[in-house]
Image: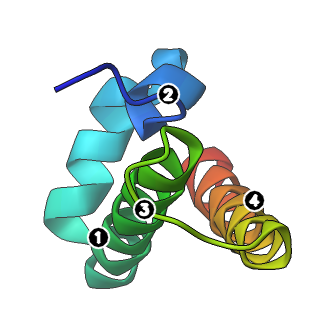
Amino acid sequence: MSHTPHELAEEFPDAVDRIHDLKTSNAHFAKLADEYHDLNRQIHRIETDMEPASDEHQTELRRKRLALKDEIYAMLKA
């Protein structure tokens, strides 16, 4: 499988340990991380033409990914 950009560890390289800790100790964070991962993979499939989607749909998915990333970032910094 090709490299999938925008993985959480890549987006927050200084917080890899914190991400792991929160994923195992905070159910809400784990849910957000799973949603982010699934959405990121879906966007990657669209960007690599493995899964067709309209530009509007792709833009909406990217907005959702950004919102999740913002929420995850806030939890990492708390």
Please tell me which of labels 2 and 1 falls first in the chain. 2
Distance from the alpha carbon under mark 3 to that under mark 1:
26 Å
The residue wearing badge 4 is: 66
Q: Nearer the viewer, mark 2 or mark 4?
A: 2
Q: Nearer the viewer, mark 1 or mark 4?
A: 4
Please tell me which of labels 2 and 4 falls first in the chain. 2
| Location of residue 25 by image quarter | bottom left
Mark linked to residue 30: 1
Distance from the alpha carbon under mark 2 to that under mark 1:
20 Å
| Element carrying mark 2 | loop
Q: Residues within 10 Å of mark 1 (few under 14, many from 20)?
A: some
Q: Relative to 2, say whether 40 is above or below.
A: below
Please tell me which of labels 2 and 3 falls first in the chain. 2
Q: Does residue 12 appear in this view?
A: no
Q: Relative to 25, say whether 20 is above or below.
A: above
Distance from the alpha carbon under mark 4 to that under mark 3:
20 Å
Q: Nearer the viewer, mark 4 or mark 3?
A: 3
Distance from the alpha carbon under mark 1 to that under mark 4:
17 Å
| Element carrying mark 4 | helix
Q: Is residue 25 left or right of residue 55?
A: left
The residue wearing badge 3 is: 51
Q: Amino acid at mark 4?
A: Leu
Q: Residues within 10 Å of mark 3 (few under 14, many from 20)?
A: few
Task: Look at the image and name its color scheme.
Answer: rainbow
The residue wearing badge 2 is: 5
Mark linked to residue 8: none
Q: Nearer the viewer, mark 2 or mark 3?
A: 3
Q: Residues within 10 Å of mark 2 (few under 14, many from 20)?
A: few
Q: Relative to 61, say whether 7 is above or below.
A: above
| Location of residue 27 by image quarter | bottom left
Q: Residues within 10 Å of mark 4 (few under 14, many from 20)?
A: some
Q: Is residue 23 left or right of residue 19?
A: left
